[in-house]
Amino acid sequence: MKFGVIVFPGSNCDEDMVYALGEVMGQSVTKLWHKDKDLKGCDFIMVPGGFSYGDYLRSGAIARFSPIMESVISHANSGGYVMGVCNGFQILTEAGLLPGALIRNTGRLFICQNQFITPVSKTALVSQNMEFNKAYNIPIAHGDGRYFADDSTIKSLEDNDQIIFKYCDVNGSITDNSNPNGSLKNIAGVCNKTKNVFGMMPHPERAVDSDLKNTDGQALFESILQLVH
């Protein structure tokens, strides 16, 4: 399995993702520049967090038109794996690869904190091998992280087991008080219908190193690796 991490102007989590995949998880990983179209034989494309193009116009709206996104869309439509984290999630919704949208947090403020999430989908690659009903402590850092979709889209996500993660409390309970940004149904991550494109607002790559006293993010990457091989 070869991972590619896209780098846009304004990406600030690309190095974290490269470190998590390469140094911690021991995988082959390479950076992919946004102006290129060559995916360099990568099997799994990661679209990292940050502030691509300064979040001008709308988060992810400009990055969606970078040259490399043509190849990413083609890769995804051919069944290839793609995952977006935070700004990467926003980019994938703007590109039409994931349903819904990420809009301004209900508090109108940028949120940067540790946040508990719990896996929901039992058929999505990134969550199906994780421990269900468990609270994983995964950092969040976003101003436009409130997941929104119309009622029919939400119903489709639920019917097709496309909701990957939900925000929860320390005990794994999904409550209004454990929702940091006002996301509908406490949704923290979703996938597409064919379950090869994934998006989440929390940053698992920031929770993989024992030096930071938090390795909860490793469970997500292990789920990917155990089920892809």
Image (tube, helix red, strand yellow):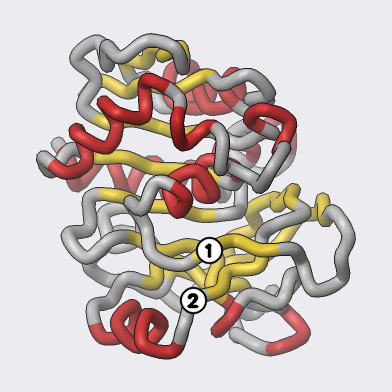
Residue 127 in view in this figure:
yes
Quadrant where the N terminus sits is top left
Give the SS element for disc 1.
Answer: strand
Nearest the viewer among 189 and 60 is 60
Residue located at (36% from left, 21% from top): 68
Give the residue at mark 2: 149
* Residue 184, placed above or below residue 88: below
* Residue 83, placed above or below residue 100: above
In the image: residue 146, left or right of residue 199: right
Disc 1 crowd rating (10 Å Cα; few below 14, some 14-19, many 20+) is some
The disc label shown at residue 101, or none: 1
Residue located at (60% from left, 36% from top): 49
* Residue 214, placed above or below residue 67: below
Percent x, y of residue 185: 55, 84
In the image: residue 48, left or right of residue 214: left
In the image: residue 88, left or right of residue 123: right
Nearest the viewer among 48 and 129 is 48
* Residue 78, placed above or below residue 105: above
Comes first in the chain, label 2 or label 1: 1
Disc 2 crowd rating (10 Å Cα; few below 14, some 14-19, many 20+) is some
Badges 2 and 1: C-beta atoms under 8 Å apart?
yes
Find residue 31 and report its image quarter: top left
Percent x, y of residue 24: 48, 24
Give the SS element for disc 2.
Answer: loop
